[in-house]
Image (cartoon, grey):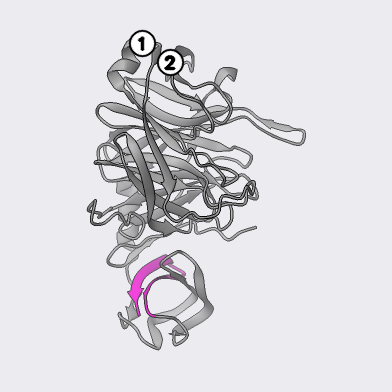
Amino acid sequence: MKNNLFLVLFFIAVFVGEAQTIEASEKFNLPTTIEETSGLIYFNNKLVTHNDSGNTPQLFELDTISGIINRTVTISNATNVDWEDIAQDANYLYIGDIGNNSGSRTDLKVYRILKSEFLANTSVTADVINYAYADQVDFTPNLNNTNWDAEGLIVWGDYLFIFSKNWINNEVDLYVIPKVPGTYAATKEDSFNAQGLVTAVERSPNSDTVYLLGYSEDSITPFLIMLTSISIDPPSNFALFSNSVKIRFDNFVGLGNQVEGICFIAQNNLTDRLFMSNEKFVFGPATFDPKLRSVDINNETLSSNFEELSEIKLTPNPFSNVIQISERVEGIQIYDALGRLVVSLTDTNIVPTTVLPNGMFYVHVRSSKGLSVFKMVK
């Protein structure tokens, strides 16, 4: 089984915390009509979702209490090649036909529809935003063995952020295109080692917080990565992963639940409430029904945990040939800027670093007090 980064915290200083835990509450089974649910948003006090590859080009409006489908809206000029996520801004809904399991698609696109049209009609026409990855040169089909798949989409200002689902290295890449109709080359702006397959992304409308939902490729066990304290400045700086604090949550939904959609519902007293959906998944004799769940993230509790444990010191920073730890620790791992493990030691307070190249690193220190994570430069 692949290693799990159950907590990753870094920004411009030291952040410390224990493994964070959340609990998901089951709300209801999804109707069979949307058992292949993929994207999810909360709009006009309703949930809006869609199915993924090969299904109808339709959006389904659900009641948040009963799960009953109240309305179905068809996108008349669209084809559901592989719809994977849905996002929104003040005026538009954006449907990401961005799934690319074989890495061979040359027709990737995002459909844009007016919210007012969606609310007033059961059939609408979409604008089209076409794109290709600027750094992709090989389109040879290779099913579930590509880094050109994508299932996450959010809006940030004048741009669409597309999050890849990397089957080869289990990382996530951030690509950016304008959110207006046209044809674009999507540029890679940042990467992060998600230690799994990212299948949905949501941005809180009330704060600069982004949630990445996904599951481990080997056991289909869901995880949630929270990006907070985000400091980016489009179009000069899109480095979302490099300029944020990251917190990972595991073990809040059992294995076998192929989570595919996430949406922000509300923020009350610093608590973010999210809904997440999983599609029907069959593995041998076992069937996992499509469900909707809710989960609460208490930001105040997370912040207090970090402040309680900030005692361990690492020097110097920048470092050269060695890192000195202020006390002997149980273990230390160093990850490069892409999240790759480059050093791993146990029971030490001195870390030789001569072999490391110049650059930025994230140093994870495990002690009896918990996990400390430092951003350091060589």
Measure the alpha-carbon separation of dots 1 and 2: 7 Å
Q: Main secondary structure of the magenta part?
A: strand
Along the horizontal axis of the image, is 164 left or right of 32? Answer: left
Label located before the other in sequence (1 or 2):
2
**Where is residue 11, by image quadrant?**
bottom left
Please check the rendered image and state whether residue 267 is part of the magenta-colored stretch, yes or no: no
| Residue 283 x, y percent position in the rendering | 72, 37
**Label 1 is placed on what type of residue?**
Asn
Dot 1 surroundings within 10 Å: few (below 14), some, or many (20 or more)?
few
Which is nearer the eye, 228 or 123? 123
Q: Is residue 355 visible?
A: yes
Q: Which mark is residue 121?
A: 1
**Where is residue 363, by image quadrant?**
bottom left
The residue shown at (38%, 42%) is 297
Which region shows up in magenta? Answer: 358-378
**Label 2 is placed on what type of residue?**
Val
Q: Which mark is residue 362?
A: none
Q: Is residue 199 visible?
A: no
Image quarter in which the C terminus is found? bottom left
| Residue 358 x, y percent position in the rendering | 38, 80
Q: Secondary structure at mark 2?
A: strand
Which is nearer the eye, 377 or 144? 144
Cβ atoms at labels 1 and 2 below 8 Å apart = yes
